[in-house]
Amino acid sequence: MTKLKILNNKSKYKNGRIYLQGSKNSMLNNLCLPLYTKEKCKITNVPDIRDINDNLSFLSSLGCSVKKVNKNTVEIACKNLNKVDCDPKFSIKTTGSKLFIPILVNTFGGYRTGASQGCDIGDRGFLNYANSLKNFGIGYKIRKDNLYEFYLTNEIQIDITLPFPSFGLTVNAILAAIASKHNFNINKICQEAEIDNTIAMFNSMGAKIEINNDALLIGTTDKLYGCEFRNMSDRNAAVTYSIAALLSNIELVIENYDDYKMDSFYHFLTMINAKYEVNKDSLIIYKSNLKLLNEDKLKIVAFLYPKFHSDWQPIISPLLTICPFKSYIEEWLFQNRLSHWKELGKMGASFEYDNENDTRFIKDGFPHAVEVAGNSKLIGCSVHANDLRSAACLVLASLVAQGETIIENIEQLDRGYESFVKDLINLGASMEYID
C-alpha cells in the first residue's frame, strides 16, 4: 500500500498555472463508443489515469486496435471483436466496466461479467442497472459463480421514465438504445455535462440523439462512422485545483478549462467571497479574504445538476473546516459519501453528523448530512483515503494542517487524477510518496 507524506511546515506555496486534464467521467463513456463502428475513432484530451487505462486494456482484450498517439490522445478501431467475458477482478475495480454490456450483448447475443463497483461510497446500483436493461431487450440471470449472464430478449419498451435522474442509468439508456437500433423516448434523464459530451460524440458518429429539457429522443441509425473527437476537460479536477489555490492562498491559472455547467460552483465561490475569473479556456482563482455573504450559515445540497455536484462536496470540505462561518452539507446521491469527515475529525475538524436528516434515502444507518463549525485548526496525523474523492479531500486538508500528514491508500488518487500531487509540488507543496 502506497502512502503520501506531507510536511506542511516545509511548504512554500507560490502562484502558478496548471494544464487541466481530460474528464474521467465522460471518457469512461466515450471510450465505449468505438465499439459501435468498424471505423477508427480518434479521441483527444484523454486523461492518463488508471480507470481509463484499465478500460483501454479491456478493449484490447476484445480485439480492438488501441493506439496511444501520445499521452492524451488515443486511436481505437474495432473491426474484429472477440467474445471475451469480463473478469470479475476487473469489473469490481471500476464502474466503467458495466458500460460495455449493451453493445457486447447486441454484438454477440450474450455476455458475462461481474458486478461493477469502483469507489466504496455505498450501493452503486448494479442490480438496478441490470434490471434497467430489460427495457432495451436485454435480460440476465445470476450464475452460481456470481457472474451475471446477459442475453437478448424481444421485449422492448420504447417510452421509458427513469426512477430518478441517475447518471449511470442515463448513460446506460443511451448506450443500450443505440445498440438495439430502435427509437426511444427516455424521460427524467440526468443532465450532467459529461453526458452531454458523450451525446455530442455519438452524434458526430452519425447517431440521432436530441435533448429536450429532461428527456432524450433517440432515433435509429443504420450505420455509425468513425470520428475525431475532443473529450471534455475534468470539472472535478478543476474544482479540486480551485480549492487547493484557496487553501494555500495563491493565485492559480487553470488552463484547458471548459466553462460548461459550472454555475453551482461559481455560486459557491461567490457566497464565500472567493475571487475568480472565467475566460475562454481558463479559470483563474485569486487570493481571497473568505467570508460568508448574505446568510448566517452556508448550506450545500450535493446531488446532480443543477444542484451542487456530489463529487465536489468532499473536495470543498477541507476549506469549510477552516472558514470563519458555519456550514451544513447534505449528500443526496451516494449513501456513504460523508466518511471522509471521520478522517478530517482526526485532523482536528469540528463537525457533527446529522443522522436524522431526511434526504431521498430511507433510513439506512449512514449519515447524510453534516454540520461544520468552521474556524478549525487542522493538525497533521495519519489518515486513510476511503475512495477517490476522499483521497483528494485529505491531500487538500494537508495543505493547511500543521506538521506531518500521512495519507494511507493514496493510490485511490490514480483512478481519477493525472498529476495532482506533482502539480501541488510544483506550486510549492512538500510531498513525497512512501511505501
Image (tube, grey):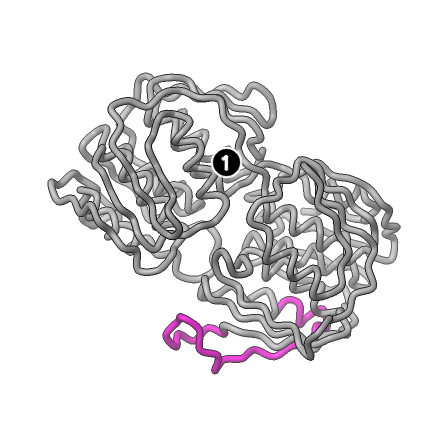
Name the residue rendered at 79%, 65% in the picture: 290
The one nearer the camera, 405 or 218, is 218
x and y, in percent, of residue 61 in the image: 37, 26
Q: Is residue 232 left or right of residue 247?
A: left
Please name the amino acid that badge 1 sits on.
Ile
Circle 1 SS class: helix
The stretch drawn in magenta includes residue 351: yes
Q: Is residue 253 left or right of residue 362?
A: right
Residue 124 position by quadrant: bottom left
x and y, in percent, of residue 123 in the image: 39, 60
Name the residue rendered at 59%, 58% in the picture: 264
x and y, in percent, of residue 120 in the image: 47, 57
User: Is residue 407 positioned above or below 415 on the image?
Assistant: below
Magenta segment, principal secondary structure? Answer: loop
Which residues make up the magenta segment? Answer: 342-367
The one nearer the camera, 278 or 234, is 278
Name the residue rendered at 53%, 70% in the picture: 330
x and y, in percent, of residue 337 in the image: 51, 63
Which residue in the structure is indicated by mark 1?
52
Does residue 308 appear anywhere in the picture? yes
Mark 1 is surrounded, within 10 Å at the Cα level, by few (under 14), some (14 to 19) or many (20 or more) other residues, namely: many
The stretch drawn in magenta includes residue 23: no
Q: Total marks drawn?
A: 1
